[in-house]
Amino acid sequence: MSTAPDTSLTPVPGTRPPAHRITVAVPDVGEATAFLAELTGPSTVHRAGEAGVVSFSSGVEVRLVPTAPADTPDTPPRLVDIGTNHLCLRVGDIEAAVAHLEKLPGADVLGDIVTIPEGPIRGNRWIYFRSPWGTLFELQQWPDTPGYADITTERLHHDQRPADDAPLPTLLGLDHTGYSVRNLDATVDHLVTHHRARLVLRTEIAADRAFMQRQFDLDVEGTSRMAMLVVDDALNLELFEHGVPDRQPPRSLDRLGGNLLELHATPQPAPTAHHAPFGLTLPGPVTT
């Protein structure tokens, strides 16, 4: 794996200053930045002090920050735990993208490519994979006409543009940032009321234990309520309220899997964060 360049950012054509910022805690910033450069392209990444930064064409910035030293290393939070974030890359040919991932050192593709047969995400194809440090990511391929077009005139952001040097075959860009939340309705209401988000679709999903084990490496079963929103026609948000027992609380930003969502971000990253009651970690004073 190549080493991410520690230079000033060479922007993706059409990139504007960050409109929204997603900060994620990782155990080794250099390793994580290099891994994402192997997917999104060396021109999309740079270092900013201790942080690694990945920039996407819609003005979304993913910021990788180091976890605090610990006597016992953290394992990644489960996908169903409150506040857990995953990043999803949109591709045009998911089979070609998976074949590339399977050759990358440290990447672990989980389960099979799933094609949704009906509902508002009909025709959507997806699969999850683990990064070398254990965090879950997703690949997603949308059909030419999304299933939700049957029921609403609202649209998610589907105009992603990759960097010219993106190594991941058929990469289009960041499809969405996804979160497990404590209360789906309260989260949607907050984002619509305070962040100009627009609700595009809702659906419900049921999965047995065998499916959850195969696709997410989780020994649970249950149901999930899901919603997708779009902010400023630039960032798609996927929210899940999982009906499983023993969901763990959100992690702080100095622990593996801790994250912070800054919508309408200021030029400088927020110095503090708080866990909102409904499950997202947002800028503001630290609370417990």
Image (cartoon, grey):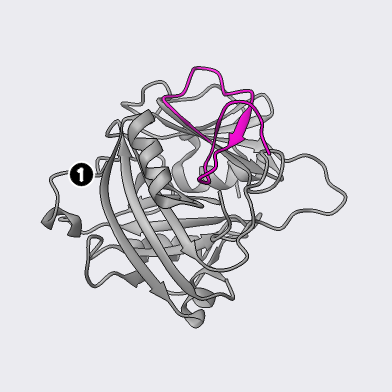
Q: Which residue is mark 1?
A: 155
Residue at the location (82% across, 42% down)? 69
Task: Indicate the secondary structure of the residue bearing disc 1.
Answer: loop
The percent position of residue 275, horizontal first and vertical second, equals 59, 39
Seen from this angle, which residue lies furthest right?
71
**In this view of the protein, can residue 161 be seen by the observer?**
no
Q: How many marks?
A: 1
Q: Is residue 19 above or below residue 179?
A: above
Q: In front here: 198 or 72? A: 198
Residue 117 appears left or right of 90: left
**In this view of the protein, can residue 267 be seen by the observer?**
yes
Q: Quadrant of the C terminus?
A: top right
Q: Is residue 164 above or below residue 18?
A: below
Seen from this angle, which residue lies furthest top?
267
Residue 196 appears left or right of 25: left
The percent position of residue 239, horizontal first and vertical second, equals 41, 51
The percent position of residue 12, horizontal first and vertical second, equals 38, 30
Residue 62 appears left or right of 116: right
The percent position of residue 231, horizontal first and vertical second, equals 32, 35
Disc 1: CA contacts within 10 A as few (<14), some (14-19) or many (>=20): some
Q: Is residue 162 above or below residue 59?
A: below
Magenta span includes 278: yes
Name the residue type under label 1.
Answer: Arg
Q: In front here: 2 or 53? A: 53
Residue at the location (79% across, 53% down)? 73
Q: Which residues are magenta?
A: 261-288
Residue 186 appears left or right of 144: right
